Amino acid sequence: MKTKDQAINYTLRRSRRARHLRLAVYCTGMVVVTAPWGFDLRRLEDFVRQKTSWIIEKLDFFKKHPQNSATQLPRKEYLAFKVQALALAKYKVDYWNQFYGFGYNRINIKNQSTRWGSCSKKLNLNFNYKIVKLDERLVDYLVVHELCHLKEFNHSEKFWALVAKTIPEYKICRKELKNHERI
């Protein structure tokens, strides 16, 4: 897409899981717009146009801060905390799964920039290494949240009822985790 001042080149990705348009600018200069299936693509150009100043601001930031310095520190930090995060995740999964009894395959620690955790269709539980920096009650909520996806692979009322069995204040925890410092 071209604006008056600058051309914005972006990649469009379609996602069955997406509910809203999502815009990401990466340190490589790549701009990605993720759209839900069935989204009216005619509205896409307007969306990008509205976000142009934000996109340019992010691209300028990454030009001023080269990729090697921006990614070096998180990689070192990830390697330093990975073992501790895995031990914490395993302990918490074992503890909370006593209440649920769900079967799972593996627990993985990842260096993700946008997620605290996930549950795969192969029944693997994935957690961000930065869980070691969270308050214990937020770790508990996060682990229970991903455990409950083993039974309900969605965010339906049934899913939230499962979470509420062991974390009745899950709404507060969820809000705190969303407002927590950026991953």
Image (spheres, helix red, strand yellow):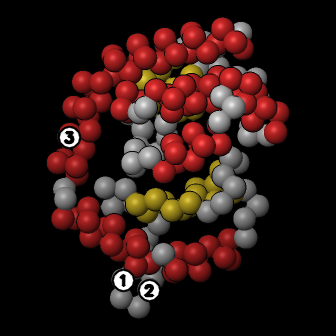
The residue type indicated by label 3 comes to Gln
Q: Is residue 8 above or below residue 156?
A: below
Mark earlier in primary sequence (3, 1): 1
Q: Secondary structure at mark 2?
A: loop
In 3D space, how far apart are the residues under numbered discs 3 and 1 (Cα atoms)?
30 Å
Q: Is residue 31 above or below residue 143?
A: below
Q: Secondary structure at mark 1?
A: loop
Quadrant of the image occupied by residue 98: top right
Residue 58 at least partly seen: yes
Q: Secondary structure at mark 3?
A: helix
* Residue lying at the far right of the rendered structure: 158
Q: 143 and 119: which one is in front?
A: 143
Q: To which residue does mark 1 refer?
A: 6
Residue 102 at least partly seen: no
Q: To which residue does mark 2 refer?
A: 3
Q: Residues within 10 Å of mark 1 (few under 14, many from 20)?
A: few
Q: Position of residue 113 (x, y in %)?
A: 41, 43
Q: Position of residue 161 (x, y in %)?
A: 79, 32
Contact between marks 2 and 1 (CB within 8 A): the answer is yes
Foreground label between 3 and 1:
3
Residue placed at 68% from the left, 23% from the top?
166
Q: Is residue 82 above or below residue 55?
A: above
Mark earlier in primary sequence (2, 3): 2
Q: Which mark is residue 72?
A: 3
Residue placed at 33% from the left, 72% from the top?
57
The answer to whether 101 appears left or right of 1 in the picture is right
The answer to whether 83 appears left or right of 175 in the picture is left
In 3D space, how far apart are the residues under numbered discs 2 and 1 (Cα atoms)?
5 Å
